[in-house]
Image (spheres, rainbow, N blue to C red):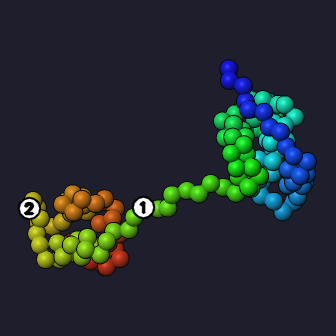
Amino acid sequence: MRQAKGITLTPQEKLRLQWLVGCDSVAFKVVERAKMLLLAEAGFSNKEIAEQLSTTRQKVARWRQRFLDQGLEGIEKDASRPGGKEKLDDRTIEKIIDLTLHHQPSVGKYWTQQSLARVCGISRSSVGRIWKNHKISPK
């Protein structure tokens, strides 16, 4: 089994972590991370820390490594995450509206969300949202 990298805290870091653990106004996740590091410095393994804090060994390993890479700043804030999906461009929206109102599908009498989505290369739910937002119906 791999051995976790040792944590050595400066007196200032240790004091800051102890303050975080004792502060009522700090988010639970930050307090949990501070506890992980204090236990890691005391020589506990990731597995032992996970058991004591009722979390996973992987989570402890992740925050231990993040501290080694970024210091205290790394544990006091969450990592950035990618934003949501890209919005549909105006051209695509106009194409969907035009096809819905002015053209018949090659099969059937009316467009369905699925058939129009297939033709335009977007999701069925996107077609539904566009219809709803523009108050249009294929019938």
Position of 131 with respect to 109 (left or right) is right
Quadrant where the N terminus sits is top right
Q: Position of residue 24 (x, y in %)?
A: 87, 60
Identified at 31% across, 79% down, the residue is 134
Mark 2 or 1, nearer chain start:
1
Identified at 33% across, 64% down, the residue is 126
- Which of the labelled discs sits on residue 70, or is there none? none
- Which of the labelled discs sits on residue 106, or is there none? 2
132 to 36, vertically: above or below: below
Quadrant where the C terminus sits is bottom left
91 to 17, vertically: above or below: below
Three-letter residue code for mark 2:
Ser
Answer few, some or many: residues within 10 Å of disc 1's Cα (few below 14, many 20 plus, some between 14 and 19): few
Q: Position of residue 89 (x, y in %)?
A: 31, 71
Three-letter residue code for mark 1:
Lys
Give the distance between the C-alpha atoms of the residues marked 2 and 1, in whole angstroms. Answer: 30 Å
Q: Nearer the viewer, mark 2 or mark 1?
A: 1
Identified at 28% across, 60% down, the residue is 122
User: Which element carries disc 1, helix, strand or loop?
Assistant: loop
Answer few, some or many: residues within 10 Å of disc 2's Cα (few below 14, many 20 plus, some between 14 and 19): few
- Which of the labelled discs sits on residue 85, or is there none? 1
Q: Position of residue 92 (x, y in %)?
A: 26, 70
Is residue 29 in view? no
